[in-house]
Amino acid sequence: MNIAFLADAVDPARGGADRCIVEDARGLAGAGHRVSVLTGPGADLGAASLVEEVRIRVPRFARERRVAAFAEGTGAWLNAHREAVSVSFAPSGPVDVHFPHGGCWKAWREAEERSFLDPEAGRRRGRQIDGNARQMLFRGMEERLMRSEKPPFLIALSGRVRDDFVRSYGIDPVRCEVLPNALGARSPASDGVRAEVRARWGVPSDAVIGFFAAHNFRLKGLSALVQAVGALPEPARDALTIAVAGKDSGVPFLREARALRCDHVFRFLGALPSLHGAFAASDFLAQPTFYDPYSLTTLEALAAGLPVVTSRANGASEAVLAAGAGWVVDDAGAADALATVLGQAIDPAARSRAAAAARSAPTPITPKDRLDRLVSILERATSGPRSTRCS
């Protein structure tokens, strides 16, 4: 099969979705398929052997104009290579398959508003998004793509993402498949690493550590976590440490915690080069996100044998529930409900049962099975009428 990935600024060194896209390209090429990755300025495929990089020429415009120029350039390339099965990972022009690793734009927009504890602040954020030319371009591109006469086949990382697209655009569920990320190799915590990392953090050996990691602290639920910790009974609160990793500023969240007299619970670590040591030092992952299509951090925590506290807005909560390896709240913004499950995560017996479930959880999908399913989906997606560009 001849496959074209549209991946504007992909860089596997950033991890997350970028790493998954490049790994899929390498896997397909290694299986004998011809894979071209169409990239724009700032992309770096790394050592993507067997993969052909096609650099789309994009003038140095403002960011929103660069997005449009990349869409035009990839459209021209695809029209000249009609045999290629085209796969987009962000809103684009017409393609055969849309595999949005960032989820549904409309659902993300709604989550951005909900992630503010102050409703008026949330509405201001909504107006800010609606006034951003680049975001409005993404919105328009997604709507045109999904409401077109021949919309692409949709691959969703989770049932949550599939349902978001069905709700937002009325797409036919028959033209959609759920394909989650593969769970990495299991990496159980080492007692030696655990003690060393805790000593470096200055956390007592008998403390209960909940680990929170994100690039966007607010969207991933740190304010919600602060409110929930503030609602805990004092003995439970004093037994808990929340270790926070990421580049975001902790100042506003410490201010919120100080107002609730729980700032002593939170330790801000900055960005970490690897999460392995943090998983070893921690007792559970705290990820009460307002939006995450399918969190790789959740999968990595499960692989490390950590139970998980998260929300249904995290597509990977499906794996947590299937394994019984943690606790899932319906709404990250419900402080009392989140405090209740935090109390269970702090309880040694409940946490031990969830950790045992995480350690023994069956792998949701292996990398090989995932690659085989991806090939099958691409073949199915192009077995009938193709996208507008191929009409």
Image (spheres, grey):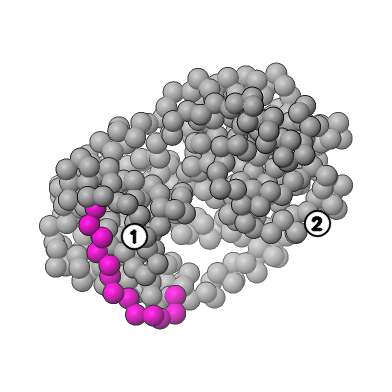
Q: Mark on residue 26?
A: none
- Pick whichever, 25 or 373, lies toward us: 25
At label 2, the amino acid type is Arg
> Would residue 234 be seen by someone viewing this image from the given angle?
yes
Secondary element under disc 1, as helix, strand or loop, is loop
Please provide percent x and percent y for residue 349. Answer: 70, 18
- Pick whichever, 250 or 128, lies toward us: 250
Residue bounds of the magenta highlight: 51-63
Q: Residue at x 76, y 45 (%)?
A: 266
Is the Cβ of the residue at disc 2 closer than 8 Å to that at disc 1? no
Identify the image quadrant of the C terminus: bottom left
Whichever of callouts 2 and 1 sits on the residue coming sooner in the sequence is: 1
Q: Quadrant of residue 123?
A: bottom right
Relative placement, left or right, of 143 versus 296 is left
Q: Mark on residue 255?
A: 2
At label 1, the amino acid type is Ala
Residue 72 vs 251, above or below: the answer is below
Give the labeled residue for mark 1: 7
Q: Residue at x 58, y 54 (%)?
A: 215
Relative placement, left or right, of 220 versus 46 is right
Please provide percent x and percent y for residue 380. Answer: 20, 43
Please provide percent x and percent y for residue 13. Answer: 44, 53
Pointer 2 local density, CA inside 10 Å: few below 14, some 14–19, many at least 20: some
Q: Quadrant of residue 232?
A: top right
Distance from Cα at disc 2 to Cα at disc 1:
39 Å
Relative placement, left or right, of 138 versus 119 is left
Residue 47 vs 369, above or below: the answer is below
- Pick whichever, 8 or 231, lies toward us: 8
**Dominant secondary structure, magenta:** loop
Q: Residue at x 44, y 80 (%)?
A: 62
